[in-house]
Amino acid sequence: MLTKEYTQSLLPVDEEPPEVFQDMLQGLVAFELNGRDNLDILSLLWPWHNSSSIITGQNSQLLEQIVRFAHNDEYKLMQLYSDLQLFPRVLGTCGDIYVVEHMTLLLDRPLLDLFPALTDTCHVTRSARRILHYLLHLSSVLPLHLCDLQWGHFGADSAGRVRFVDLDAAFSAEKMAATQRETVCSTDEDCDFFDCRGTCDVAQGRCLGGVSDNVSNLCRQLVWARAPLLGAQRRLGLLAAVLSEQQAELLERCARSRTAEHAQQVAEVLEELERRTCAEPEWETRDTDTDEF
């Protein structure tokens, strides 16, 4: 919880040039910048006003509001990378609340993993394939760890494009590595952060910098998740009923992996399942040169 005293201590004073406040904001978002330098951070965080007029106008209430949002990881990612169209678009703010565009969740049914027979297999397969393509695209443009993967955290905008809608546990590779290296551990499990699996350097008693890839998290948490009521070692993902033994083994390897090494094979499995379970596979009807996730 940010105190008023703290936020006020970060505000510019009359004799300070505007660059001082800009530099302070740059420091607050440093972990999220991913090497993108020379950005007008204030304009990205607060695009509704001219950045120079915000500082020179000395509107302390507005400046405090901006400082508070600069501490909100989800808001920062949505604003700093709005040009990549990966997350919901921020429409505006009211006090400490921000409003984003409406998203239609890809899958939002209760007890999905417990009662997979009640789900539409075609819709599940299609959604999983689209999510995988989204994650692969994300890895190519923004190295971000999504450590809370749930079906209900993926949505589609008004044009049908996939977006990740809950960024509370999303961290840049740099921020995750810094956090991991400061974590004391004696086992690998001590280095796990939600769905992201870490590795312990037992000799040093500290976690190593890296964590599991988003694709392996997808296999482990969604596509090939464990069934809580059937024992810790039983798998009963939403697609279990339609998988061949060979496909199930592949998803198991993907779930146990910490990298994206099986991504292409998993994509091929999902395309084959969509072809088999859907009357008209969506991926076959699209122009392959377009952004199809």
Image (cartoon, rainbow, N blue to C red):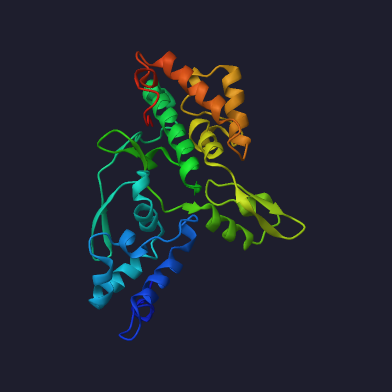
Residue at the outermost right position: 203
- Residue 65 in sight from this viewpoint: yes
Q: Residue at x 35, y 43 (%)?
A: 85
Q: What residue is shown at x 41% (from left), y 72% (from top)?
A: 24
Up/down of 251 relative to 208, above or below: above
Q: On the rendered structure, is 99 left or right of 29?
A: left
Please report the residue visible at 49 percent of the width from the left and 60 percent of the height from the top: 31
Residue 159, located in which quarter of the rendered image?
Answer: top left
Q: With 224 as the anchor, is 95 left or right in this view?
A: left
185 vs 152, left or right, is right
Q: Position of residue 282 (x, y in %)?
A: 36, 21
Q: Is residue 11 above or below residue 147?
A: below
Q: Residue furthest front?
A: 38
Q: Is residue 69 above or below residue 120?
A: below
Q: Position of residue 10 (x, y in %)?
A: 38, 78
At 48% from the left edge and 35% from the top edge, which residue is drawn?
222
Picture coordinates of residue 43, whole percent (x, y): 31, 62
- Which image quarter holds the C terminus? top left
Q: Nearer the viewer, residue 126 or 34?
A: 34
Viewed as shown, does residue 226 lie left or right of 152?
right
